[in-house]
Image: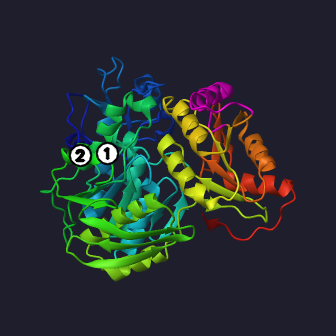
């Protein structure tokens, strides 16, 4: 990319140095700088990228972007652009270098506190069933050209250069659409700045990531940025213009709040009240769900899906609303939902011949933990045992709330590690336990605190008896456990099988969905 084109992509307040020549890459990490790169200095929570400008220049950076004034010792053959917000401009530059790939795709963004990954994959399945080739970015994996690769980054929304590179791969694969799971941090930190969204989908909003946003109000405001991003007047150089809409959950308290941020038409969905897309005659079973769907044009059809629980019906309705916008027939939508395989680590059963049930789920907020426990309660003949924790260096407000939920809905809880990071693991468990105690549970009788997730899982299995259910919550599909600064290999499903094997259970049929 020509440097002049890079400068045209950002509102520079001041430019120092020659503007001739090219930049070959964009990065915010000085260690990744190659000769000819543009280094964007970002002032973060732990490090200030401006302190690494000298390192970037020594490695051959041709252009520097930052919010501070240009360094006094800037080499005469290098350029420095001062901007108001370097995080925001990182997104703009990354999009420009990648050739603005989202302008060549219909882009669906999915946000919410819970259900984002499942809904993203449901939308992908429905659109593919309708003959629309899709790429995908989610917490679990990425997809381009029909090929999926696991997302091991531990980030749902990657930094702007990686987002734009993935979108470029999706364009190159020949896809017509990209479905992007989009987090509040991805929105607030401008990781998706430069992405031209066409449809926004919101599953629900409760409270999460207050370590970043500070307040619940700021968290909700960040989510609303996705709705604001839908410009009904924007067009793309595509054979057929993508629909423009905000798909909102009329059953969620966020519905009224979000409406004020939507310039595009709103498509509502509901299980409880009249809406554009609604579910009727729900039949929720242990092996799946059946319900009738009414579309905005009055058409109705029946859905039979292996997904369980009311919250997954809501996820299906959100995906159906997107399918309707893209003119996928009801028959094809029903077929996609009937064969949907589920998402790894979401209500996934582990079977090793043990006399009790083991279910792995990603539930890591008080709201999602409550939903999963309520689903499992009627499916459990004996005791319901919850194994869960709360991540270190993250939202502390939710810790006692999670303890209280478990105290109310589980018969026994093992409170254990979930990525303690650089916090003291035992202190995190005590904060969770305080909520359980406030809700009336006593330690020893109704819960235990065990540092070390494997030990916690083992203790739960040792306690379980025939007819019990053990829920392993919080990790789901994740492939690592972060202790201190070290990311250790981890998979709840693998560890569960190892611990069951140690107890003498060795019969291992294929994993199934709860």
Which image quarter: residue 6?
top left
SS for callout 1: loop
Vertically, is 310 above or below 19? below
Position of residue 386 measured from the top left corner of the image (x, y, whole percent): 65, 46
Position of residue 355 measured from the top left corner of the image (x, y, whole percent): 78, 62
| Residue at 51% across, 35% down | 31
Quadrant containing the C terminus is bottom right
| Residue at 73% across, 37% down | 452
Which image quarter: residue 455?
top right
Label annotation for residue 489: none
Q: Contact, CB < 8 Å: mark 2 with mark 1?
A: yes
Residue ranking furthest to the bottom: 331
| Residue at 27% across, 48% down | 255
Say if the magenta span includes residue 422: yes
Vertically, is 174 above or below 139? below
Residue ranking furthest to the left: 233
Vertically, is 276 above or below 15? below
Tell me if 419 is positioned left or right of 169 in this view: right
Q: Nearer the viewer, residue 206 or 345?
A: 206
Vertically, is 188 above or below 242? above
Note whether residue 131 is visible.
no
The residue beneath circle 2 is 256
Position of residue 432 measured from the top left corner of the image (x, y, whole percent): 59, 31
- In whole angstroms, how far apart are the C-alphas of marks 2 and 1? 7 Å
Say if the magenta span includes residue 415: no
The residue beneath circle 1 is 253
Looking at the rendering, the stretch of residues picked out in magenta corresponds to 417-444
Position of residue 30 measured from the top left corner of the image (x, y, whole percent): 47, 34
Note whether residue 361 is visible.
yes
């Amino acid at each position: 990319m020509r440097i002049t084109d890079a400068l045209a992509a950002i509102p520079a307040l001041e430019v120092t140095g020659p503007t001739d020549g090219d930049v070959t890459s964009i990065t915010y990490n000085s260690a990744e700088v190659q000769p000819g790169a543009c280094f964007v200095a970002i002032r973060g929570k732990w490090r200030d990228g401006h302190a690494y400008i000298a390192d970037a220049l020594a490695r051959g950076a041709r252009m520097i972007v930052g919010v501070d004034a240009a360094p006094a010792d800037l080499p005469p053959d290098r350029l420095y652009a001062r901007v108001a917000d370097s995080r925001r401009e990182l997104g703009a530059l990354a999009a420009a270098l990648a050739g603005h790939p989202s302008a060549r795709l219909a882009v669906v963004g999915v946000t919410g506190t819970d259900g984002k990954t499942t809904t993203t994959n449901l939308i992908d399945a429905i659109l593919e069933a309708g003959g629309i080739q899709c790429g995908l970015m989610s917490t679990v994996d990425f997809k381009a050209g029909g090929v999926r690769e696991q997302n091991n980054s531990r980030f749902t929304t990657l930094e702007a250069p990686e987002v734009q590179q993935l979108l470029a791969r999706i364009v190159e694969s020949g896809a017509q659409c990209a479905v992007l799971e989009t987090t509040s941090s991805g929105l607030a930190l401008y990781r998706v700045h430069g992405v031209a969204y066409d449809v926004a989908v919101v599953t629900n909003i409760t409270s999460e990531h207050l370590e970043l946003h500070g307040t619940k109000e700021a968290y909700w405001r960040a989510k609303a940025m996705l709705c604001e991003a839908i410009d009904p007047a924007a067009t793309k150089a595509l054979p057929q213009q993508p629909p423009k809409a905000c798909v909102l959950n009329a059953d969620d308290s966020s519905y009224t709040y979000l409406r004020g941020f939507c310039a595009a038409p709103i498509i509502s969905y509901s299980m409880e009240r009249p809406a554009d897309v609604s579910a009727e005659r729900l039949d929720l079973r242990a092996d799946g769900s059946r319900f009738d769907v009414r579309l905005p044009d009055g058409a109705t059809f029946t859905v039979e899906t292996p997904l369980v629980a009311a919250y997954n019906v809501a996820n299906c309705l959100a995906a159906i609303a997107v399918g309707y916008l893209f003119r996928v027939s009801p028959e094809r939508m029903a077929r996609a939902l009937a064969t949907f395989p589920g998402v790894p680590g979401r209500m996934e059963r582990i079977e090793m011949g043990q006399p009790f049930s083991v279910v792995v789920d990603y539930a890591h907020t008080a709201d999602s933990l409550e939903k999963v426990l309520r689903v499992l309660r009627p499916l459990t003949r004996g005791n319901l045992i919850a194994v869960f924790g709360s991540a270190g260096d993250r939202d502390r407000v939710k810790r006692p709330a999670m303890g209280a939920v478990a105290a109310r809905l589980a018969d026994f809880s093992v409170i254990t590690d979930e990525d303690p990071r650089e916090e003291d693991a035992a202190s995190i468990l005590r904060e969770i336990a305080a909520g359980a105690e406030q809700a009336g549970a006593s330690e020893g009788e109704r819960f235990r605190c065990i540092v070390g997730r494997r030990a916690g899982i083992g203790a739960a299995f040792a306690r379980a008896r025939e007819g019990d259910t053990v829920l392993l919550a919080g990790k789901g599909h994740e492939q690592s456990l972060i202790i201190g600064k070290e990311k250790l290999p981890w998979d709840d499903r693998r560890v569960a099988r190892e611990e069951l094997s140690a107890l003498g259970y060795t019969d291992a049929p294929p994993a199934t969905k709860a």
